Image: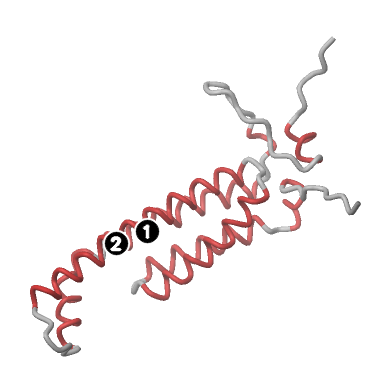
Amino acid sequence: MTEPPESDDQRRKRGLPPEPAVPGEKRDDAAVPGPVTAGFWLYVLAGLVLVAAVVLTFPQQESLVDSLLEREVDGLTREQAETSVTNFLWLLLMGALALAGFTWLFAYKARQGTRSARTVLTVLAAVFLLVALLLPGLMAIAAAFAAVLATVLLHLPSVTDYFPQVGRSLH
C-alpha cells in the first residue's frame, strides 16, 4: 500500500520547496498568498520598465556623445565618442535584460515558495536601486520602486510561513 503524495504545504512545513511539476501538469496556485503573487507581478513589471528605460535611452545617443565631447578629454574624437556611447548603450541593454531575466526567474521560484529565491530577490532589488542611481530618468526610478515594493511584500509577516526556514540540527 502506497502513501498519498505529500502536499506542497506538508513539504513546506518540513522546510522543503514544493514538489516539481511534471511537464504539462497543471499546478494548483490557489495556496499562493496574495502578497507573493502581487510581488511576482511587480518584479515582472520592474524588469519590463527597466528594459524599456534603457531602450528609450538609445534615441538620446547624440546628446550623450555631445556631453562626452564637452568634457574635453585629450585625443577623443567624435568617432571614438560615438563608438564608446554605442557600445555602452548595448552593454547597458544586455545588462538590463540579464537583470530582468534573473529577476523573473527568481520571482517565479519565490512564487513557488523557495526561500532562497526571496533572498536573491532582495539582493536584486538593491541592484535595481543602483541602476536607478546610474540611469537618468523616471522609468529607472519606477523600476527600482517596483522591485523594492515587491521585496517588501515578500517579507511581510503574513507570508513568513510560505517561505519556511529549513530546520537545522545543532548536534
Colour pattern of the rendering:
secondary structure
Q: Residues within 10 Å of mark 1 (few under 14, many from 20)?
A: many
User: What residue is pinned by disc 1?
Assistant: 96
Q: Position of residue 163 (x, y in %)?
A: 72, 48
Left or right of 150 in this view: 89: left
- Which residue sits at x=60%, y=27%? 21
Q: Which dot marks residue 91?
A: 2
Q: Position of residue 96 (x, y in %)?
A: 37, 58
- Which residue sits at x=12%, y=74%? 80
Amino acid carrying mark 1 in the image: Ala
Does dot 2 land on a helix, a strand or a loop? Answer: helix
Q: Quadrant of residue 69?
A: bottom left
Left or right of 145 in this view: 29: right
Q: Which dot marks residue 2?
A: none
- Could you tell which of marks 1 and 2 lies nearer the N-terminus? 2
- Which residue sits at x=55%, y=43%? 108
Outermost residue toward the front in this view: 171
CB of mark 1 within 8 Å of CB of mark 2? no
Q: In the image, is residue 84 above or below residue 10?
A: below
- Which residue sits at x=14%, y=80%? 66
Quadrant occupied by the N terminus = top right
